[in-house]
Amino acid sequence: MSIIDEFCQSKIFIEGLSILRPKTLIILGSGLGDFAKFVKNPVIVSYSDIPFFVQKSIEGQSGELVIGLIGQHPVYIMKGRNHYYQGLTDEEMRYPIQMFKYLGVNNLIITNACGGMNPSFKPGDIMIIEDHINMMGRNPLIGDNVDIIGPRFSDMSEPYSLLWIEKIEEIAKSYEIHLKKGVYVGYFGPSYETRSEILAYRQLGGDVVGMSTVPEVIVASHAGMQVLGLSVITNMATGISMNKLSHDEVLKTSLEAMDKVSLLILKFIAFLE
């Protein structure tokens, strides 16, 4: 079976769930799944029910697709995502974003929980992702190119929309929400980084570090999507914080930042209308 046949089966299944045909996909990171409560008349389905959609969820991520309206704007919401450290192949990692592109999605709002490396950051801060550094040693586009999705060699000069960065800054200012801006470093995981790795990533220009987002944005950029990336700094990275790192801390701080993140996304979606 070809990848196009797989896309078709996923498309038939998803379009059979709702009359809505969203152009916007929102991916919610660890501890941020409660944003889905803002969706009107939601249709909710487990990833495991979607043909060819691999599900390997982790704590704090429910592994569900939500379809519905935010205001008058139809959206798909992914409550959680897969990670390379769960043992997925490149094809499995790229499948969700490419499948949503096949469904007609052009806009991606992506969130994550991450560790802060910039000493001017603190837990609870929200950072606009301006760019990223891929330190995963993997690229989800490796393998046969899907020509109907994007070109073999895709441009990465603006993976995060400059126009959208300006817009979210404008929204944040109007609601007196202070945002950071910086570079996200994608780390393979699942272990947290060592003190020396954090020092190296900081010297490379990284401001935060996490185990997601970069693969999805690479695929979204290849597909010609516009992308807005928001990171919640849930802890300071090894060597900056004197505390041991834990996933529980990540979830706790994400929940505390939820109100601000939700307001930003809600107002940004109104801009898309």
Image (cartoon, helix red, strand yellow):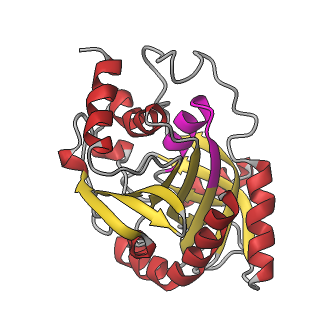
Residue depicted at x 72% and y 82%: 177
Q: Nearer the viewer, residue 126 or 151?
A: 151
Quadrant of residue 232 within the rendered picture: bottom right
Q: As displayed, is residue 138 above or below residue 170? A: above
Question: Going by the image, does 19 lie left or right of 142?
Answer: left
Quadrant of residue 60 within the rendered picture: bottom left
Q: Nearer the viewer, residue 272 or 261?
A: 272
- In magenta stretch: residue 8: no
Q: As displayed, is residue 219 above or below residue 123? A: above
| Residue 150: % across, % down | 57, 22
Q: Nearer the viewer, residue 184 or 129?
A: 129
Q: Nearer the viewer, residue 44 or 238?
A: 44
User: Number of labelled discs?
Assistant: 0
From which residue to which does the magenta span run?
Answer: 213-228
Q: Inspect this view and state whether residue 136 appears.
A: yes
Question: Going by the image, does 98 lie left or right of 165?
Answer: left
Residue depicted at x 73% and y 59%: 182
| Residue 210: % across, % down | 51, 57
Q: Quadrant of the C terminus?
A: bottom right
Q: Inspect this view and state whether residue 120 appears.
A: no
Residue depicted at x 61% and y 39%: 225
Residue depicted at x 64% and y 54%: 228
Q: Residue furthest front?
A: 19
